[in-house]
């Protein structure tokens, strides 16, 4: 569950900014986008009540200033899934998520 998620999230975060930017052809925009994504992940974890997981990820990405709880990432994923699949897979995912809640 949460530990597996943290392992996935933390591994790429441990690289320095220089390594990340060279990995992405030196694109500063890509580094900023990645940092923004990690901040949204921390915010989503806080929003969902996973404060310890949020703190662990935040520590590894050196998130400053601190992020506030937010469901923005969840909303963006929902929009992306809906757009990508014309709503078909999105409806299945929503149904499955309700079954586990």
Image (cartoon, rainbow, N blue to C red):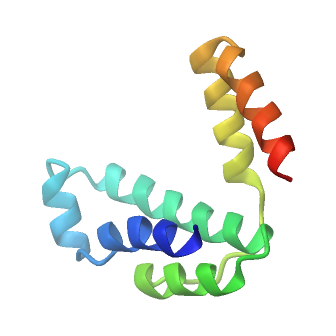
Return the x and y of residue 87 as percentages of the image width and height: 72, 16
Picture quadrant of residue 21: bottom left
- Residue depicted at 68% across the width and 22% down the height: 82
Picture quadrant of residue 64: bottom right
- Residue depicted at 71% across the width and 77% down the height: 50
Question: Is 38 above or below relative to 73?
Answer: below
Return the x and y of residue 48 as percentages of the image width and height: 78, 67
Return the x and y of residue 53 as percentages of the image width and height: 60, 80
Question: Is 37 above or below relative to 67?
Answer: above
Picture quadrant of residue 75: top right
In the figure, is residue 78 to the left or right of 29?
right
In the figure, is residue 9 to the left or right of 3?
left
Q: Nearer the viewer, residue 91 or 22?
A: 91
Q: Which quarter shows the N terminus?
A: bottom right
- Residue depicted at 64% across the width and 19% down the height: 83
Return the x and y of residue 31 as percentages of the image width and height: 33, 58
In the figure, is residue 83 to the left or right of 15?
right
Q: How many marks?
A: 0
Q: Nearer the viewer, residue 84 or 1?
A: 1
- Residue depicted at 57% across the width and 19% down the height: 84
Question: Is 62 above or below relative to 10?
Answer: below
């Amino acid at each position: 569950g949460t530990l597996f998620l943290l392992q996935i999230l933390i591994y790429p975060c441990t690289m320095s900014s220089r390594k990340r930017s060279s990995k992405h052809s030196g694109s500063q925009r890509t580094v900023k986008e990645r940092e923004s994504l990690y901040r949204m992940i921390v915010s989503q974890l806080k929003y969902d009540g996973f404060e310890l997981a949020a703190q662990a990820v935040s520590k590894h990405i050196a998130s400053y200033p601190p992020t506030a709880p937010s469901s923005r990432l969840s909303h963006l994923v929902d929009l992306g899934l809906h757009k990508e699949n014309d709503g078909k897979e999105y409806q299945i995912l929503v149904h499955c998520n309700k079954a586990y809640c």
